Image (cartoon, rainbow, N blue to C red):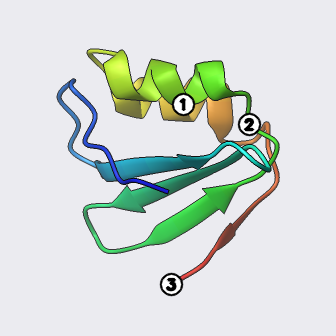
């Protein structure tokens, strides 16, 4: 997995990564928390990377929709 910084402005997300093999989205927050979200389609990862508002995409398209766990 390669970490990427979203292009949009966000006060919460530091970096995101994605594992193609099992469709796991990994999000590193600016407060140091790291979460994995499971079975997330790659298009959602791309939305996070290229959105002007990645935090809104995370809240609308990921949180509450996919199983997750804190991994740090």
Identity of the residue drawn at 75% across and 42% down:
64
Front residue of 33/41: it is 41
Quick check: 38 left or right of 31?
right
Q: Residues within 10 Å of mark 3 (few under 14, many from 20)?
A: few
Disc nearer the start of the sequence (3/2) = 2
Mark 3 and mark 2 in contact? Answer it, CB < 8 Å: no
Q: Residues within 10 Å of mark 2 (few under 14, many from 20)?
A: many
What element does badge 2 sit on? Answer: loop
Quick check: 37 left or right of 33?
right
Q: Whole-Å distance between the Cαs marked 3 and 1? A: 20 Å
Q: Quadrant of residue 11?
A: top left
Mark 2 and mark 1 in contact? Answer it, CB < 8 Å: yes
Quick check: 47 left or right of 20?
left
What element does badge 3 sit on? Answer: loop
Quick check: 27 left or right of 32?
right
Image coordinates for residue 27, horizontal then vertical, percent? 47, 54
Q: Residue furthest bottom?
A: 72
Q: Whole-Å distance between the Cαs marked 2 and 1? A: 8 Å
Q: Whole-Å distance between the Cαs marked 3 and 2? A: 20 Å
Numbered tag placed on residue 45 in the rendering: 1
Identity of the residue drawn at 47% across and 69% down:
34
Q: Name the front one of labels 3 and 1.
A: 1
Residue placed under numbered mark 3 in the picture: 72
Question: In this picture, is 50 found above or below 33?
Answer: above
Front residue of 31/4: it is 4
Disc nearer the start of the sequence (2/1) = 2
Identity of the residue drawn at 65% across and 41% down:
63
Disc nearer the start of the sequence (3/1) = 1
Residue placed under numbered mark 2 in the picture: 40
Q: Residues within 10 Å of mark 1 (few under 14, many from 20)?
A: many
Image coordinates for residue 31, horizontal then vertical, percent? 28, 70
């Amino acid at each position: 997995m390669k970490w990427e910084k979203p292009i949009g402005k966000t006060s919460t997300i530091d970096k995101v990564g994605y594992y193609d093999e099992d469709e796991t989205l990994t999000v590193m927050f600016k407060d140091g928390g790291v979460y994995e979200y499971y079975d997330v389609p790659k298009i959602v990862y791309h939305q996070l990377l290229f959105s002007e508002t990645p935090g809104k995409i995370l809240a609308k398209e990921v949180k509450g929709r996919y199983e997750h766990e804190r991994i740090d």
